[in-house]
Image: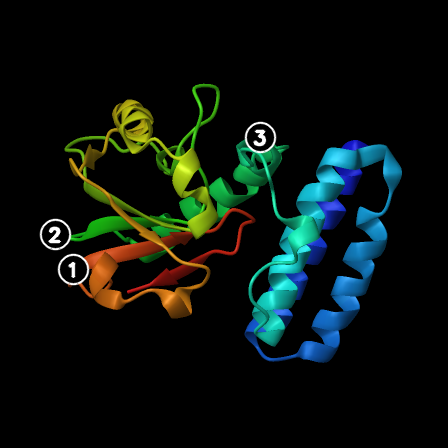
Amino acid sequence: MASSFSHTALRLLLSCAKAIEVGDLKSADAFLQNIWILADERPYLYKSRVVKYFADALVRRAYGLHPASSNLTFHVDPASYYHYDSNRINGVIENVIHGALMEKNALMGNRRLHLIDFSIPYYCFQNSVLRTLPTFSGDPPPVRVSYILPPFLKKYVDFSRQMEFLTRDAKGVNVKLEDEFKVVYANSLAEVDECEIDFKRRREMKWWWFTINLNLISW
């Protein structure tokens, strides 16, 4: 039953995000109504809180509301809530990424892979964004990682510790990780200056990694 809740919530959140992306607010509102009904199911308190958090974010994205509703703001370290049931979500994302890399021959020539991660801090029992990649054979391809995180996470993130996890996972998938990663704090992409994160480097494939599997490839 719990896994059915997770699957349904993820499907509704993704459908709502896609509707917002194409400007179909009528459909987005319908999805949001179903999301709120689902999230009110009492047996899954923590999961419901996560679903409501992202539903609130979708409402703000659709209607330009800012900041988040105070009653849905996390007052403690939110990492455990964000990563709740993450294995199921990450499995879906990995399949999408693997297929895209194979289909587009993404790392042919001197391309470098740029992972842009919207998720929050990793912990020792969790995989980093690098673990969504297939394991490469031969010479390790170059990879750089950037983060776009909401401002309220500033006090929760120890990036020296995050680099340890990235280094560990880079060895696991055989990629050459850049020594430094870029971090930008913003509530949306609209607030990010392209120069801050250097979006326009040539010969580079970018992979946008969203916490709830809102993935986009750009070249």
Which type of secondary structure does the marked residue at label 3 adopt? helix
Position of residue 172 measured from the top left corner of the image (x, y, whole percent): 31, 23
Q: Are marks 1 and 2 in contact (CB under 8 Å)?
A: yes
Q: Which is in the foreground here, disc 3 or disc 1?
A: 3
Crowdedness near tag 3: few (<14), some (14–19) or many (≥20) residues, C-alpha within 10 Å: some
Q: Does 160 appear above or below 71?
A: above
**First along the sequence among labels 3 and 2:** 3
The type of residue carrying mark 1 is Arg
Q: Which residue is mark 2?
A: 110
The answer, for residue 10, to whether it is visible in the render is no
Q: Residue at x 75, y 71 (%)?
A: 29
- Count every numbered label the image shows and give the total: 3
Element type at mark 2: loop
Q: CA distance from mark 3 to mark 1?
A: 36 Å
In the picture, measured across the screen, residue 40 lies left or right of residue 125, that is: right
Depth check, mark 3 against mark 2: the one in front is 3
Cα–Cα gap, marks 3 and 2: 38 Å
Residue, disc 3: 80
| Residue 190 image offset from top left, x and y in percent | 40, 70
For badge 2, the amino acid type reads Asn
Answer left or right for 180 relative to 49: left
Task: State whether residue 211 appears in this view.
Answer: yes
Pointer 1 residue: 203
Q: Quadrant of the N terminus?
A: top right
Quadrant containing the C terminus is bottom left
Quarter of image, res 64: bottom right
Q: Earlier in the sequence, mark 1 or mark 2?
A: 2
Left/right placement of residue 13 relative to residue 211 reads right
Q: Distance between the Cα atoms at labels 1 and 2?
A: 7 Å
Q: What residue lies at 45% left-to-right and 63% top-to-bottom?
A: 188
Q: Nearer the viewer, residue 9 or 58?
A: 58
Residue in front for this viewpoint, 114 or 64: 64
